[in-house]
Amino acid sequence: MAQTSKMMCAFLLCSMAGNAHSSEPSVKSLRGFRQNSSLENQSNAAGNATLEDEYLQDSNQSQLGSEENGRESGLSCRSLNNPSNSVCAPVVRWAAKGGKWDPQAADWFKDMQSISKVDYKTASEGDWQKLYFCAPPGGKQCGSPPCTCSNPPCDVCFSGGGEKEGCSANPDSIACKRPKTALEYNGMKWKDIKVSGQGPFTVFAIGDWGGMDGTLNPIEGRPNLVAYPGGHKPGPSVFPRTRWNKQHTVELCNHKQFIRCYSTDGRDCPPGCGFVKGIDDQPQILVANSLKARAAKKNPEFILNVGDNFYWGGIEKKCGTPMNELSYTAHHQFDQIYEGVYNGPGLDGKVWLSVLGNHDWGGRVFNNGWDQQIAYTWKSARWVMPAAYYSTHVDFADAGFGMDIFMVDSNAMDASDLNEDPEHNICGAAHNEPGATCASQGGPASLASCKQWFWDLWAKQKTWLADQLGKSKAEWQIAVTHFPCGHQKSFWQAMHQSHGLDLLVTGHRHDQELWAPNRLGGLTCFVTGGGGGISSEATPNVHNKKDWYGEAQYGFYDLTVSKEAIEITSINWNGYEIKSATVHPA
């Protein structure tokens, strides 16, 4: 290895992914993988740290700074000599002087152009400090932004983003005017979606689709999102979950065993894991390719997105970024996991009506960057998530009917007492740091109040939804939420039987399940949690279905909509139509 590469490897804390040792959905086994194309010089300092360990250390890494952006943290610019930058100063100086000429520099410093708007070969020392403030290669983050850089402002990590149509004519509409806090627009109505033509019309539904971004250079001392060799490649990589029998009484494949399946392309894989090479190792891409092929033929009007948009823990930074800013972390994850995957004829420019899943809140913490997914609404031409819960109206004017869609946050289902179920508890004490808060964005103010906050939010929505359904004059009423058919069963039955809800669209369980109406008191419901961001509930091997809950493990749904009926078709990862049902207005 060249001397500069050895130095850079030391700076980057190069390490390989080790053996995993936990049960899903814990991510204890994800190693602090400081990705580098030269892995000859490994550092035990990073190699022995699990993702859980590093998450728990976040709050203690004072020199790294608790926020990505100087504005959101209250930090003002500081020179590289300031103590707040002691962690990054050596590598910044090395990179600015000689490291940029290393043969691997183009890979290490690939984010420079996006962040500083200059080529890394001509970057100033201030540009290098900005890079290590916003997206530090190897994790050695600067605690303060530079005071000078080639393209100010020097404390803003990402300044791009799109704009909704029509904002010049109506700048004060909800679609154009950003809220001051992430949850200011809770319960509000998004602008109408207008659809022309006689129909019938196509709508897609998908969930649990967003894999891990292995090329992200995390901030706040967080580990890279790499679970196994190969996970560092551009685009999404799947998170391997534990597999159980259908009754969830027997663990068939633990997380450590499943990691071996992924690490060896199935060569060293216990039979109980049911790992299918070519499917389990790329499910998001397979489902996306099927969705894109069908979109090119059917031209969907919009997409219903039931959440868990980014594994493992949503946007990998703390909440608190101002709503008029998009962190570089959020930009990178959206670019790699969403924008770069779901595009092409029939999808470009199509609205994604979206809700948060439990992993978007943080999975087992409540203070990850869920607010940045809401903020992206005003940075994107197609992403719509203006609040935790909201509604919109679809006007099929030429065809003579309308549809009211209610986007509901059901993540209270994973908000439990402090010491309960630590790996599935947004409000658990095991992984939330003691001072965690999202009060500045309208979220939970503290760990102590977290559980009550989520259940209060759910209570407000129950009243809100009943009221909105009662006021709806549309032919169709549809609810979209994350937690699957069967949760809060009596509530959803009442929404159908007493308030006219026609269809419930859900996710969370990592498969595809089209429920018969008699299972929910006449309400048709389906689970579309097989988007492929995380491995499926059971093996996708069609010759071994004994542990399947539904008709498929990976896929999405196609809804053909008319005034008289909605034809629901379950689409497998390979594009096959495998189950269908018809819904009529209540």
Image (cartoon, rainbow, N blue to C red):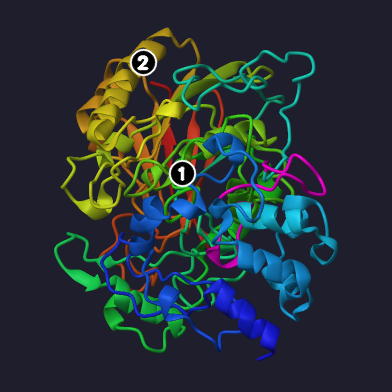
Image coords of residue 338 (percent x, y): 61, 50
Callout 1 crowding tier (Cα within 10 Å): few <14, some 14–19, many ≥20: many
Answer above or below: position of 16 versus 420: below
Tags 1 and 2 in contact by the CB under 8 Å rule? no
Q: Mark 2 is on which residue type?
A: Trp
Q: Which residues are magenta?
A: 134-156
Viewport quadrant of the N terminus:
bottom right
Horizontal placement of 180 versus 425: left or right? right
Callout 2 crowding tier (Cα within 10 Å): few <14, some 14–19, many ≥20: some
Residue corresponding to mark 1: 318
Looking at the picture, tell me which residue is in the foreground, 430 or 295.
430
Answer above or below: position of 516 versus 279: above
Q: CA distance from mark 1 to mark 2?
A: 29 Å
Image coords of residue 52 (percent x, y): 34, 61
Residue corresponding to mark 2: 464
Mark before the other along the chain sequence, 1 or 2: 1
Q: Tag 1, which secondary structure? A: loop
Q: Mark 1 is on which residue type?
A: Lys
